[in-house]
Amino acid sequence: MASPALNMNKQQSVALRAPNRFDTLPIALLFIISRASILGVFPFSIAFFAATTDKAIAYLALTVISAGLFLSGAKILVVKYIIAFLLYWIYDKLKTKNNTVYDATACGMSLCVGGIFMIAADGGSIYSILMLIAEGLISSISYLVFKKTDMLVKTRKKREQATKDELISVVITISIVITGFWGLQFRGITLCNILSIYAVMVISYLSNLSVAGSGGLCIGFITAMGSDTAILNMGMLGMCAMFSNMLKSIGKLGALIGMIGGVGVITLYSGGQMDMPINIYEALIGAALFIATPPKMYSRLSAYFTNSLTIESIQLDTRVRDYLALKMIKISNSFLSLNSCFEETAQKRLNLYSREAGAIFDDVCERVCSNCNMANKCWKSEFSQTYKLVSNLLSTIENEGVLLEPTEEFNKHCQRANEFISEFNHVYELYKQELVHQGEAISNKELINSQYKEIATLLDRTSKMISDGFTFREDLEEAAVSFLDAHGIGVFEISVVEGVEGQLEIYAGLNIGTDIKKCESAFGQVCSVPIGYVGTEANGIMKFASKPRYSVDFATRQRCKDHGKVCGDSIKAFKTEDCRMYFLISDGMGSGKKASSESKITLTLLQEFLTAGFDVKTSIEMINSTLCLKLDNECFATVDLMMLDLMTGFCEFYKIGAAQSFIYSQGRVDTIFSASIPVGMLKSIKVSGQRRRIYDGDTVIMISDGVSEAGYTSVRTEWIKNEITNICDNMDDMADNVIHKAIKKSHDTVIDDMSVIAIRLIEN
């Protein structure tokens, strides 16, 4: 039997070789199985060769199959199976990779093609054609059964468990092997029946009740399918198996008594009116073989029937809780980032308060104290006391809106107390009017209301995500555990989550030191889509996910205004769990540290919300209302965002006061324009996406206004359209070309901060 390989990407081409002692058992089994007949046809030999036999001894396999078929009475049908054998052997040599489904199909198709030649030669009937199709289907199914059995045999020593479908495959294989002895008898005693009794008792003795019962039914039905006693034989061996298994706790004797009990039940049921498919002599010989089998043999055989793999289903509420906990942590992180932004804003407000308080004091002093003969004493020798008293006045007017009269303490300290209070009220009123002029007086109630509205939208989206956004694929979980265990990979916990768009996330608890590449290959074969390793969670659970259809080559470049050290533009590029790539440019107002701070806040908040799973529109509106709680009219930033779905190739552009973007696709350049003012200026902005489909090799250029405004021609961005059509080997060169050309267009000066993102889509 060929050793199973986990990596199915390459098919090894092996030359023919001489047989050795390791080929003895596979060749012997191939001979016996080639004799197995069902409904007058022999569909098993080609399937067994395809699934288990080393193709380097194909010549020997063909000889053995031909001999087995001829000795079993196949006669002229041998030609059909020789043709089928050669067709599959050619297919095996030509194929570039192994695929179980394709191989099983090829096995069945080869047999059908071989049969067509025979039907064409003999002028077969419709019944012959239907029988041929049925034989091809049986051959394909047999291939899958033999493949699972071969996998279990070759990997059993390094495994702790066997799956139930593997155990059933073993039982079916045993049944087919026993069928190969059909027709061999001596004085009415049939070897096939003896082996059937023996096999049923061994399986019942070594396995659990479900495997024993199904094993007895399989052996009984398959070994007698060619006769009219198949149903009776199946019922008899099924009852024997269950009775033997139930009494095996008292040893071999109990199993033997159970078998006799099963025969007795069937005999009583038939009332002696039907001939029993297995006579008493065959049953006694089979039982004797069972008793005579040495313990060492049972010890070796038990490795295939004990410790069958059982997947304990995790309670649904526990799994949902754990999954949602991960999602809610990400949502929490988004609001923590929002909180950090508010804290930073609050700190700025304190700084402004301190700065403006000094200006208010200076203005009042200029009006009241400049010609007072006590000014030097109050503001120099007694500065601390004076400053404290005036600060108390500011605190009072902040709380009450107006100063009605000086306090007793201030009245004692200042000889112009009433005049000071009057001027203080006047200057403070002017200060408030100035704040209104600067935009500080935006209605906080409306902004807070907007914040609440956006939070409600976020939570509503989360609710929909919980109800509709994912499904636990228990079928894939069970298949994955079976497949991993078959390859010696232990797994103690697994969850397969399918998103609304079909993407898969696999959370697996694996043994330390597990080969990640093997796991990726295994999950990919089970799920029928490419699967890649994402990372390991804090609790040690490894995460795998669907590999996207596309990847990207991208590069970013920036230049500071006047070749300074701090760029007012900020750039981010990141990928989220739903296989979406986000590219962002934010341009803070002006340049330098202040502009850089505002643009970084905008992009940081956007990344947090988008990573948490919220849509772009909600995220931008949430951030806009946050930035509207600003300190002056210089606190705003543009947003240039491109969302690229790596599964489909569709992208969406969101431009809030941003410069144009350019797409070079299929020989033409498309321009994406801005549709809204920058975030943070108005409490309500228009957020709408512009959807495009891009393809393998297409290029996208995103720029800030420092690049778009470069040059002095009437159509300033025309040079960018020309530049994007110049094919570059990589996006580093493309980004460099754009930024250098922009500087050249500006006569080698950088009149504003410049930022470029060059993106190329690549089909994997």
Image (cartoon, rainbow, N blue to C red):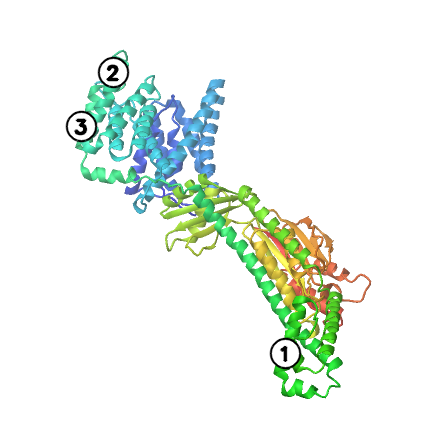
* Label 1 crowd (10 A; few <14 / some 14-19 / many >=20): few
- Name the residue type under label 1: Glu
- Please, what is the three-letter code of the amino acid marked with disc 3? Ala
In the rendered structure, the answer to whether residue 723 lies left or right of residue 43 reads right
Residue 217's place in the image compared with 529, above or below, is above
Q: Nearer the viewer, mark 3 or mark 1?
A: 1
Q: Report which residue position mark 1 lands on.
A: 409
Mark 3–mark 2 Cα distance, whole angstroms, equals 24 Å
Nearer to us in this view, 422 or 564: 422
Quadrant of the rendered image containing residue 164: top left
Relative horizontal placement of residue 487, taking residue 527 as reference (left or right): left
Residue at 41% x, 55% y: name it: 540
Q: Secondary structure at mark 1?
A: helix
Q: Of discs 2 and 1, which sits in the foreground?
A: 1
Residue 223 position, x and y percent, is 32, 24
- For the image shown, how many numbered marks are present on the structure? 3
The residue at which mark 2 appears reads as 268
Which sits earlier in the primary sequence, circle 3 or circle 2?
Answer: 2
Residue placed under numbered mark 3 in the picture: 288
